[in-house]
Image (cartoon, grey):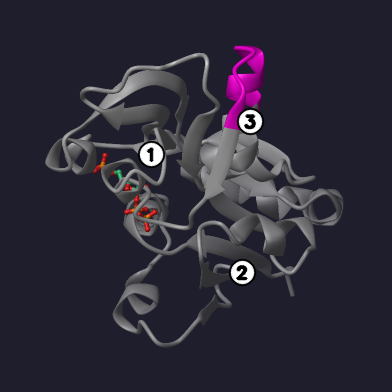
Amino acid sequence: MKPLITVALPKGRLGNEVCEKFKIAGYSMDETISDTRKLIFEDENLGVRFFWAKPSDVHVYVERGAADVGIIGKDILLEYEPDVYELLDLEIGKCKICVAAKEDFFDNKAKTLRVATKYKTIAKEYYMSKGRKIDIITLNGSIEIAPLLNLSDVIVDIVETGKTLKENNLVIVDKIIDVSARFIVNKSSYRFKEKEINKLKQALESRG
Ligand code: PRP
């Protein structure tokens, strides 16, 4: 029997795009989509087992070997720097990490800048490179509210369509980096299941 490859998929917005990518690659994802309560889906014929995880948890499963491979945003890789191989840019889930603020924002360099974000590492590195003193305010979601309620001066967050910023009268102050979904692999899985993992990688790569 061929070894089973366990694949960690990110739930939510990126998950839908990832499903399409696997479908194009020849994997039937019908069961994974229709049954939203079940968490693990096995396809013995194809030798794969899929499961859904929070996007920010995918690397934890892969780094520790509970999953052999996973799909994850480059933003999460930059933030947590997990010890995994990054084998492929899937070129989906394209967005950018930006600094954003209220339209009338003025950066008073005499003051410590209050930065609300869930990307602590990325924000720290960005402002360190600029020699700017900051106070990080860690939030887990709906970051855009922070400057509106004067919890922070700016935010560092993902911008995809720009709709959330626009609807909250916020503007981009600077783009930090472009990001997209990546195919990551557990280091020891790659040693023992290299053939199967490469087959999966090629399937995702070659069919758009
Ligand atoms: C992300 C991000 C922004 C929004 C940007 O939030 O944090 O809030 O998407 O997308 P847009 O540019 O297309 O409007 P997400 O939906 O992941 O939820 P969150 O606020 O809980 O992080």
* Residue 98 locus on image (x, y percent): 40, 28
Q: Which residue is mark 3?
A: 124
Q: CA distance from mark 2 to mark 1?
A: 24 Å
Q: Nearer the viewer, residue 206 or 190?
A: 190
The span shown in magenta is: 125-134
* Residue 51 locus on image (x, y percent): 53, 72
Q: For the residue labelled by badge 2, is the local secondary structure a helix, a strand or a loop?
A: loop
Label 3 amino acid? Lys
Q: For the residue labelled by badge 3, is the local secondary structure a helix, a strand or a loop?
A: helix
Q: Earlier in the sequence, mark 2 or mark 1?
A: 2
Q: In this image, 6 relative to 116: left or right?
A: right
Label 2 amino acid? Gly
Q: Earlier in the sequence, mark 1 or mark 3?
A: 1
Residue at image coords 22%, 37%: 165
Q: For the residue labelled by badge 1, is the local secondary structure a helix, a strand or a loop?
A: loop
Q: Nearer the viewer, residue 107 or 142?
A: 107
